[in-house]
Structures are given as C-alpha cells and as structure tokens.
Image (cartoon, grey):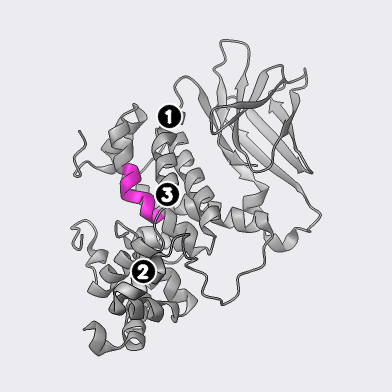
Amino acid sequence: MTSDPTNPDVVDDPLLADLRRLAGAVDPVPAQVTAYARSALGWRRIDAELAELLVDSQLEAPAATRSASDLSRTLTFRSSDLAVDVELQANEEVALLGQLAPAGRAQVEAQRDDGRVVAATESDDLGRFRLELTAGDRIRLVVRREPPAAPVETSWIDI
Amino acid sequence: MTTPAASPGELLSRAAGGDQAAWDAIVDRFSGLVWATARTHRLSRADAADVAQTTWLRLVENLDRIRDPERLGAWLATTARHESLRVIRRGGREQPTDEPDLFEAPEDDAVDKLLLEQERDGSLWRAFAALSDRCKTLLRILMADEPPSYEEVGAALGMPVGAIGPTRMRCLERLRRIAGVAELGA
C-alpha cells in the first residue's frame, strides 16, 4: 500500500507504515461504527426528496459568542420546493418547533436512525408544528404533503 | 462483485442504485480516514463514533449529489471535520489541555500488549506521544488506513495542502530523533 500512482503524496515513509500498523492496534475503527456505516445504505432515498441541511447554528456560531444559557439551536433545511425551519429547545426533553414554507398542512414525523418513528404530528394551516424528542437521538424529519407533492426527508441531525 | 479498481464515481453510482458491495467498498476505503479525522479533533472514541456515523449518513443522503466523485475522500473528511467541530461546540467542553489525549486507549489492553510484545513498537509509540500536538495531529491522519492523499489530509485538518509535505517531513524527523535513529533505522 505504499505506491498509489494517482496519489504520489503517499510514497510511504517506512516509519509511517509502522505507525499506521500501531494505530490500527491502539486506536482501531470500532466494529460497530463500520457495521453502522455499512447498514447506512439502507437509508438511501427511494421516492422522497432531500431537504438538505443549509444552516445549523451549532455549526455556524462561534462558541465564544454563545452563552451557557443559550440552549436553543436553529436549523434550516431546504428541498426544491419546501423549506423547513426548526428550533430545538433543550430542557429535560427537547422541543422541536418547526415551520414549513410554503405554509400549509402536512404530516410530519421524526424518524430515528433505528427506523422507529419517535414522534409525529400535523402542521397547522400556517405550517407550524411541534414535536417532543429525546436528547441523544439521531433523527430526520419526514414531511408528507398533499399529492402530487413528493415526500420530503431532511438531513439527519443529532439532537 | 466489486473490483478494487472501481473508481469512486462508479462505486457511488452503483451504491446509489442500492449495490451493497459497492457501498461496502467505499466504507472500507474511507472509514479509516473518517475515524482519524474525528480522533484528531481530540474527541473521545464515543464522540468520534457519533461523528463517523453521522458522516456516513450524510454521504448516503448525498449519494446522487456528489459533484466530484474523485474527491470523495476530501468530501468525507470535510464532513467529518465539520461534525467534529459541531460536537465540540455542542459539548461546551473546555479546550483540551496539552495532555496527550489524542489516543485514549480502547477498552481492551491493546497498548499494554503492544508494549510488552514489541519493545520497538513501544518506544516508537512513546516517541509519538512526546511529539507536539501539531505533529501528532498530522501524523495521526497520515496513519489512516488507507493512506490518505494530501488533499484529504488538508480537508480533515482544515490545513493548506502546501503546508502538509514540509510539516510531515519535520515531524517524522523529530520522531526519529526522539525514538533514536539507530534503533529505528533511517
């Protein structure tokens, strides 16, 4: 594994090869991570459209500007014809306050990465909805509007 | 059947069609890089596992949207770096000290066995631990299996590609000096 013609950077120093062997023994990729990664293909979209994560205040905000009491996190997802704005308010439970744009009624569910639907509701006429979630879960939202609009799935987020 | 020679673009499009073998080939090729990226952000193995899992889900989301498949490794490293930074911010944790925590030992006694069985490995690993954070971080990424390209290394660390070669050389020199040139060979 020392000479990759497409990758001339990696003409391996023998010392580096030794270190790689040691890293494999001391700090290996956990087997459950590899198993999870392999099974993740089962989550690929078949009929739904992705609402991609565009904004995550936890990604954007410099830690220095956030106070310890600032427990809310805002996220924006967008597909070709739907925007989903979300605010997460963490207490013992995590309240997810959502807003669909364009506004309107839709079935909204939170799907956990083990396949379970952990919360479901319907948005009101103004496109607002609220879900109660559990901290530590990894979820995505699935939004079903009146046909012919295709179902929309958001990016996964860690709550 | 997936041949190792399949290009990332080919593997991606087959995986997007549901080909598990193609997907497994992508995971096998890059899981070391994704893991090392999280670990060089000094995340615990538990937090690094979260980052790696989220990173793989991100790729599944984007299977049909990767614009430049030849740079898939850099895309994964960038995604893992962003997720690592998010976990650090979420935790509101203190910045790590200079404690050499880059390698929190796994649950088993792999390190002890390593040190006992191979004296040379032990002195090499101790020498590695004595390096500066900058060197440990860079070398840890370079240790990923498969060996990453400089572009992937730069993406994982948020480091200009041009700085990698010279830093790598300096860090390996320092490592040799600490560990003892005679013992490790040139």
Along the polypeptide, which appears first: circle 3 or circle 2? 3
Q: Amino acid at mark 2?
A: Lys
- The magenta stretch is B26-33
Residue assigned mark 1: A42
Question: Which residue does the image show at 64% across and 24% down from the upper left?
Answer: A109
Return the mark for residue B35: none
Q: Is residue B162 above or below residue A54?
A: below
Q: CA distance from mark 3 to mark 1?
A: 19 Å
Question: Which residue does the image show at 67% across and 62% down from the upper left?
Answer: B93
Residue assigned mark 2: B113
Question: Residue A2, how many percent across, how many down?
Answer: 20, 63
Q: Amino acid at mark 3?
A: Leu
Residue assigned mark 3: B76
Q: Is residue B167 above or below residue B182?
A: above
> Which numbered disc, 1 or 2, marks the residue closer to the eye?
2
Chain bearing mark 2: B
Q: CA distance from mark 1 to mark 2?
A: 38 Å
Quarter that holds the C terminus of chain B: bottom left
Q: Quadrant of residue B129?
A: bottom left
Q: Are marks 3 and 1 on the same chain?
A: no
